[in-house]
Each structure stands twice: as structure tokens, then as C-alpha cells.
């Protein structure tokens, strides 16, 4: 069976370690509506979090936590959503999404229906700093 996350990066690569890569979602409605949408993708094909060793589970969650910390400190979101669904792509990955009270779906999940119109001029324009700066800070936090 093919796996899109084994065959492609799954987004713009922000950081890569031997254990995982972190990407920012750059295509489709998700990227337009939720510009600070990151994914931590485990390097080896594992379907479930419990498939990882204790050491790898800790490393994975430490990285997810660092991404959240960077987004909170730089972008001051209303909330950060963290999810690992894997129903469509059975390859372990975590979504880390900065959410704002002005985003089109807040407070509903990003996969629910819109609660209001999208931000005029694009949601990325409302962020406290350019996405490239957030990308660089995420990369620095994870590769130091």
C-alpha cells in the first residue's frame, strides 16, 4: 500500500531530524485559512503513536511541545490545536495549528464548517510576523 507521507514531504519542510520532519502546510484551503498550520511527520512509517518506543514517543511529544511554544511566543494565537488523527493517511503525524479568534472557523475545528467569512486579504496578513520568521524559529527550536 502506498503512503503519501512516505513518498513526499507533505508540505514545506521547516526542519528535519533523523526521527521526524516538520512541515508547514502550504497548499489548499487549510493553508489559506490557517497559515500557521504545521505537521510533525514521523520519519519511519508507523501507524500509531504506541508503535514508537518510549524514547521515540518522548522525542515526538517534546518536538510537538516546542512547535507549540514557538507559535505561542511569536504569534500569540488564541489557542493552539494539536491533533493526531491519521484516518486518511495512516502514517504517524501530529497537526499543530495556531488558531485565532478571527479565523474563519474559530472556535470550531479546522475541519468543521466555517463560522464566518475568511479574512479579507488572507489570514497570513493578520499574523504578528511573516511565516518565514515562524518557520525559522521552529527550525531553530528543533535543531539546537
Image (spheres, grey):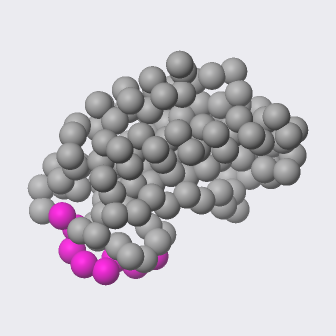
Reply above or below: 104 against 23. Answer: below
Q: Is residue 60 magenta?
A: no
- The picture quadrant where one finds residue 114 is bottom left
Q: Nearer the viewer, residue 80 or 43?
A: 80
> Quick check: 52 left or right of 30?
right
Reply above or below: 17 against 82. Answer: above
Q: Is residue 113 magenta?
A: yes
Residue 118 position in % (x across, y down): 22, 67
Q: Nearer the viewer, residue 54 or 112?
A: 54
Q: Quadrant of the N terminus?
A: top right
Q: The magenta stretch spans which residues?
A: 112-119
Residue 108 position in % (x across, y down): 42, 77
- The picture quadrant where one finds residue 8 is top right
Reply above or below: 59 against 87. Answer: above
Q: Is residue 88 visible?
A: no
Reply above or below: 81 against 39. Answer: below
Residue 41 position in % (x across, y down): 63, 39
- The picture quadrant where one finds residue 3 is top right
Residue at image point 55% right, 52% down: 95
Residue at image point 74% right, 52% down: 90
Q: Is residue 141 visible?
A: yes
> Quick check: 83 left or right of 50?
left
Dominant secondary structure (helix, strand or loop) of the stretch shown in magenta: loop
> Quick check: 83 left or right of 44?
left
Residue 59 position in % (x across, y down): 71, 35
Amino acid at each position: 500500500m502506498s503512503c503519501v507521507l512516505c513518498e513526499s514531504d507533505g508540505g514545506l519542510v521547516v526542519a528535519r531530524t533523523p526521527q521526524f520532519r516538520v512541515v508547514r502546510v502550504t497548499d489548499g484551503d487549510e493553508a489559506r485559512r490557517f497559515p500557521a498550520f504545521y505537521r510533525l511527520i514521523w520519519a519511519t512509517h508507523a501507524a500509531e503513536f504506541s508503535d514508537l518506543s518510549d524514547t521515540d514517543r518522548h522525542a515526538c511529544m517534546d518536538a510537538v511541545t516546542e512547535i507549540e511554544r514557538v507559535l505561542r511566543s511569536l504569534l500569540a494565537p488564541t489557542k493552539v490545536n494539536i491533533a493526531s488523527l491519521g484516518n486518511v493517511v495512516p502514517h504517524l503525524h501530529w497537526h499543530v495549528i495556531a488558531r485565532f479568534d478571527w479565523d474563519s472557523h474559530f472556535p470550531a475545528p479546522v475541519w468543521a464548517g466555517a463560522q464566518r467569512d475568511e479574512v479579507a486579504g488572507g489570514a497570513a496578513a493578520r499574523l504578528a510576523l511573516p511565516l518565514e520568521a515562524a518557520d525559522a524559529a521552529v527550525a531553530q527550536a528543533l535543531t539546537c
